[in-house]
Amino acid sequence: MGFLDDMRELSSVSVGLLKNPGAFIREFALLIRNDPESYYDFLGDDVLEAQDSGFSKDQKPLWLNLGYWEMARTYPEACADLARRLARAARLGEGDVVLDAGFGFGEQDLLWVQEFDVARIIGVNVTQLHVDVARKRVEARGLSDRIDLRLASATDIPLEAGSVDKVVALESAFHFPTREDFFREAFRILKPGGRLATADCMPWVGEKPTGLINWLGWRRWGVPQENIYDREVYQQKLEAHGFVDVEVESIRHHVFPGMHRYAEKRHSGVEMDRIEVEISPQDVENVLGVEMWRKQGGLTDYVIFSAVKP
């Protein structure tokens, strides 16, 4: 985006906000605070803005990711499929002690214990709302002895060196201040031969988002500007922190189109449990929805990474 495009977009958004004082105050607060805790408090129990139901629906799935839509056609199944892909990238298995950095409401932890039979998950999260709700959900399922969720930072993990088998971050590492500090901590707490796996958002290869609108988006979402780099730089940073055997897979064709179709239906008033997404081959080929991300932060790639501590 050029300067004039930024100004037109900002002017359009500003006019809308000035007509709604409550929204203006909320947006101003998000920009001033510039942290993920404030943004996720604002989102509440839904990944989509303005869809929070205040935890009034007991059976509502509490996933907070964009989902993997190659086969899935409902939002909960797409989110579960993304968690499964990350688990396979991390080689999660029986007996593993896992650190989950940024666990949201704990949906993935419940799935990993049930489907991959990991021995223990220790989760860290800086959002008190997430910790409180996720702990209650874990307790309700009788899994508190296997899932230990803590209010703590992924850049200052309260664990001893060499104490876990796997470290995972499901669509959260772009928030960490900074992602490189997380890499350093992950390397420290992993056992030799342990593996780090992330599902992460970033610019497309060679793209370097700039401009006022992108900057405002990063501040609003609590994304440090230092984390804005592509997957090639991401791999280089992993290797610079000691990781080897780095595996990189972009899955954006099966993330953005499905989420775009799903969001369209939710914003039109259809309830989550009544939505089945239809995705055409053209949607996949053209990466439907990616232009929206390009205009609002420039995070147009979605990548699964896996790397080993030697």
Image: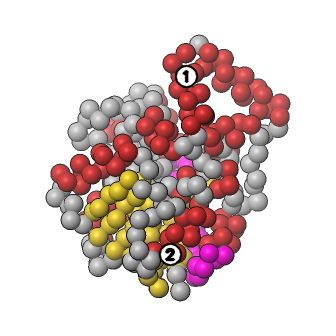
Residue, x 74% and y 37% (percent of image)?
Answer: 212
Is 52 magenta? The answer is no
Q: How many marks?
A: 2
110 sits to left or right of 82:
left
- Residue holding disc 2: 188
Residue, x 61% and y 34% (percent of image)?
Answer: 31
Is 250 magenta? The answer is yes
Residue, x 32% and y 32% (percent of image)?
Answer: 54
Q: Identify whether 300 is placed above or below 129.
A: below
Residue, x 78% and y 28% (percent of image)?
Answer: 7
- Residue found at the far top of this picture: 19
> In the image, residue 186 lies at what x, y percent?
50, 71
Indicate the colouring scheme.
secondary structure
Q: Kindly indicate the quadrant of the structure image that contains residue 231.
A: bottom right
Q: Nearer the viewer, residue 154 or 89?
A: 154
Q: CA distance from mark 1 to mark 2?
A: 41 Å
Q: Kindly indicate the quadrant of the structure image that contains residue 268.
A: top left
- Residue 170 in view, yes or no: no
In what element is the residue under mark 1? helix
Residue flagged by tag 1: what amino acid is it?
Answer: Ile
Sooner in the amino-acid sequence: mark 1 or mark 2: 1
Q: Identify whether 95 is placed above or below 145.
A: below
Q: Nearer the viewer, residue 116 or 188?
A: 188
- Residue holding disc 1: 25
Disc 2 crowd rating (10 Å Cα; few below 14, some 14-19, many 20+) is many
Q: Kindly indicate the quadrant of the structure image that contains residue 245.
A: bottom right
In what element is the residue under mark 2? helix
Residue range in magenta is: 239-258
